[in-house]
Amino acid sequence: MRLGELAERLQLEVDGDPDFEVTGLAGLEDAGPSDLSFLSEASYLKSLAASHAGAVLAPRGLEVGRPCIRSLAPYADFGRAVPLFFSAPPAPEGIHATAVIGDRVELGDEVAIGAYCVIGDGARIGARTRLYPHVVLYPGVRIGDDCELHSGAHLRSGVRIGARVVVCNGAVVGSDGFGFATDANGRRVRIPHRCGVDIGDDVEIGANTTIDSAHPGHARLGFPEARTRIANGVKIDNQVQIGHGCSIGEGSALCAQVGLAGSTVLGRGVFMAGQSAAKGHIHIGDGSLIGGATSVTSSVPPGAQILGVPPGLERRRWARIVAAWKRLPDLLVRVRELERRMGPDR
Amino acid sequence: MRLGELAERLQLEVDGDPDFEVTGLAGLEDAGPSDLSFLSEASYLKSLAASHAGAVLAPRGLEVGRPCIRSLAPYADFGRAVPLFFSAPPAPEGIHATAVIGDRVELGDEVAIGAYCVIGDGARIGARTRLYPHVVLYPGVRIGDDCELHSGAHLRSGVRIGARVVVCNGAVVGSDGFGFATDANGRRVRIPHRCGVDIGDDVEIGANTTIDSAHPGHARLGFPEARTRIANGVKIDNQVQIGHGCSIGEGSALCAQVGLAGSTVLGRGVFMAGQSAAKGHIHIGDGSLIGGATSVTSSVPPGAQILGVPPGLERRRWARIVAAWKRLPDLLVRVRELERRMGPDR
Amino acid sequence: MRLGELAERLQLEVDGDPDFEVTGLAGLEDAGPSDLSFLSEASYLKSLAASHAGAVLAPRGLEVGRPCIRSLAPYADFGRAVPLFFSAPPAPEGIHATAVIGDRVELGDEVAIGAYCVIGDGARIGARTRLYPHVVLYPGVRIGDDCELHSGAHLRSGVRIGARVVVCNGAVVGSDGFGFATDANGRRVRIPHRCGVDIGDDVEIGANTTIDSAHPGHARLGFPEARTRIANGVKIDNQVQIGHGCSIGEGSALCAQVGLAGSTVLGRGVFMAGQSAAKGHIHIGDGSLIGGATSVTSSVPPGAQILGVPPGLERRRWARIVAAWKRLPDLLVRVRELERRMGPDR
């Protein structure tokens, strides 16, 4: 595709030869001479100098030494260019004959339901929402407009989902929370989790992620009902676990394998890197950043940046450090003793 | 509902105005003036004083200053009250016409099988057990009475399950263990895992949890057969991984994202917090408590309380500590040298 | 089964009484007097001395004091003996009447497709490949010969799989990567992931494992296309997460709950123990070994052995060490001060 046509389709402006022929897309490091790449800011100019990219998406005013398309958000516009080179895989259309649809189900216009989906009684699915094959909605589930639910997604009763939400394969929403009490006979008994999950608009839920339902003990002041809550624009990666009664603030992002124990509250715009975790009943402030594999065990103020995992080290070096580390309390005593004997510094 | 009626339905006694009208349930912190809450012990009296809860479930003899229901196990009884305010979501009934049921399958009385379930040849399902839609039982699986299997649960051949077991959505039981050997040509070859999994009574298995099958190398003295074993009353949260040949003792609880490597043996009443893990071929004693995200790498005596993950700290503070920590072996040498030079303390 | 017959069926040689009757298989520790066990090397002779095993698979030349079968790879041959004692569970045969098979699907000879499988348009399945019930292939998926896909496996468009690959239950391959950009209006927008996943021959993918699709920014020099890549012979355990654009070298093994962030490159023969993780955009050299739960945050040379998680310790001891550890930067200063005051060592 000619660079000029590409710019036009993205509604952006060319800077340089509009007839330059773009044959593919790639990152700076790996792009070839007919690829379009992108750089978001001046700090990438060094990578650009070493890059074979024939053309780039770049911010206005940045001298890039090759044909380019000017963009206010080069990476996002690179993303918008993807569909021009890679066609969308086919999606389900219409209602497949094998779909089992319960009583009193409400379907919006142009809903698509794939083979072997099971839609429980009283469920409601918004306009243009697409269910790939093998999606199961328990009775009463509500889904907004323009959502996409992939095969193997299972939504339990009490789940309500907003608009433009993507639920990836194997995700489970509204499963029983892990809440037990000990009864008068000393037996562990289940607290029924019937208060459900609320998911806002523009949320993405990764493959095999699990989000548990709440029980009434998870009521929260200022909300009319006890529910597990995922606010608008939250992005959740694969294999994330969200316990009963959690509340995730708008625009937060949870990377793969993150785990939130029950009743964790995340503010807006929190970022949790892969495998990190939060103890239950704590509050993580707006805009906080939690490092990979870090366990957060007490509440954290807005804007905090929390780390908690030592970097991996070579086996022998690691062993020496751990051995010394186990003797730390003793070392502290020995230094205190040395200071005592040395007396005050005059 | 009147407090008196509520108490009667729970078979407990009112202490205070039986005509007090309860409109909902909530935890102490968030309860409103017409909610019923609970407190388990005197240590919560401070929270109670600050609570707007109109009524509470409370132990006998505790002065609570508002209408209450007396209970030996207030949290468990709060759980028993949930169904009085939140009706149970509908469950499958009867055998759905689309269920594919193999040869020589034995079904107990009042078994329910949802749409698109697949029941392999020779499987056996106990009385009143309910399978939600999209449950797959491989040939020969055996399930006891009064179990509940949610959609997307997959049970492989060799799995035997007791009574009153709940298997949540997407859980996989009896999958191939991760066991390979190197053959005479240096190729990695699979050890067939055909010895299955035994699950006792009153077990709960969380969403997307995986429990692997054993092979004959996992035989254990005192048991007639090599199997992965989950004893009675074990509660397993979401996304837990239990490797081949593990044995989990009665009443143990494994929180979300826990991982047990192969042949780990847990005693009775072990509690493993979220994301914790055990190395294979070790024994964790009865009643042990393993902290969140902690890796247990050697056997642990009964009653041990094991921690192993530093708390997350502010980025700069963390960086300073890790930098110092990497120099610990050197610091040890320096302190030893100072002590040598200081000579004996006289 | 007589030991002689067993040896013959394994095409190995007996050393000792060929009429010795073997009734079962077990590890050394737990074997009974009529069980066949195995030992791989002389270091196990101590365990052998304490073992009740009636017979063993053992390397040539090792004196074992009981009837044995000589083997170059005793553990692998123990694995080959398993099917002689434990019959294979039944597998699907033929094309089940309920399978929904799209247009232009190509099926090799003797393909088996279980109940309720859904095969998207244009998919291709190699000879003798078996799909258990409830497998979903999105349009265009390609699978080689002699593969085995278990129930609940979901393969998205753009996935290509080699020969003799096993995909366990609930595994998701080709799901959307976790890649977002911020657009000119400050909104987080998805980068479409349409570049797919390539999986080589003899790969195993564990239950509920997730492997994400790539986007064009994941192109890599020397490869014609941007794809997530799993090379031949890679073994992946349960609940592993492999991010978009990762590349896993031949013969590597990833244990349960491992997480790889996007664009991680693993060399050949890398071993990552359970719950370990790699930051994105790093390279882990050939033959490296990453310890359990260890986070690797920078590139690692070939043959490295990396550890990064302190062993769990008794609660009080742990608390003392962590308290001291938080004071480490201060301790460093105090030791420096002591050294200064002590002056040079003469």
Image: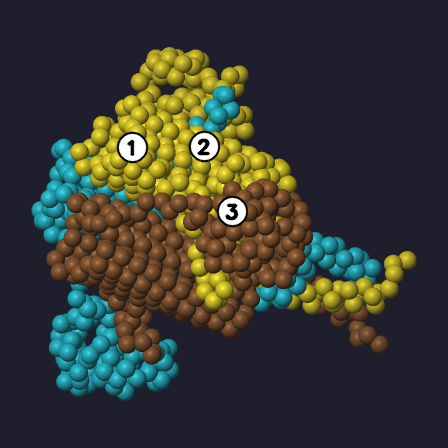
Chain colours: A cyan, B yellow, C brown
From the viewer's side, name the closer residue of C212 and A227.
C212
Looking at the image, residue C280 lies above or below residue B215: below
Task: Say which residue label 3 marks.
Answer: C2
Q: CA distance from mark 1 to mark 3?
A: 35 Å
Mark 3, Cα crowd under 10 Å, few <14 / some 14-19 / many 20+, is some
Q: Position of residue C77 (x, y in %)?
A: 49, 56
- Of mark 1 and mark 2, the one earlier in the sequence is 1
Task: Give the amino acid at mark 3.
Answer: Arg
User: CB atoms at circles 1 and 2 under 8 Å apart?
Assistant: no
**Residue B180: image x %, image y %?**
47, 57
Residue under pointer 2? B200
Q: Is residue C267 left or right of residue A117?
A: right
**Outermost residue, right side:** B346
Q: Residue C144 or B39: which is nearer the viewer?
A: C144
Question: What residue sits 24% from the left and 75% below the top?
Answer: A25
Residue bearing the label numbered 1: B105
Q: Is residue B93 above or below residue C199?
A: above
Number of marks = 3
Q: Amino acid at mark 1?
A: Val
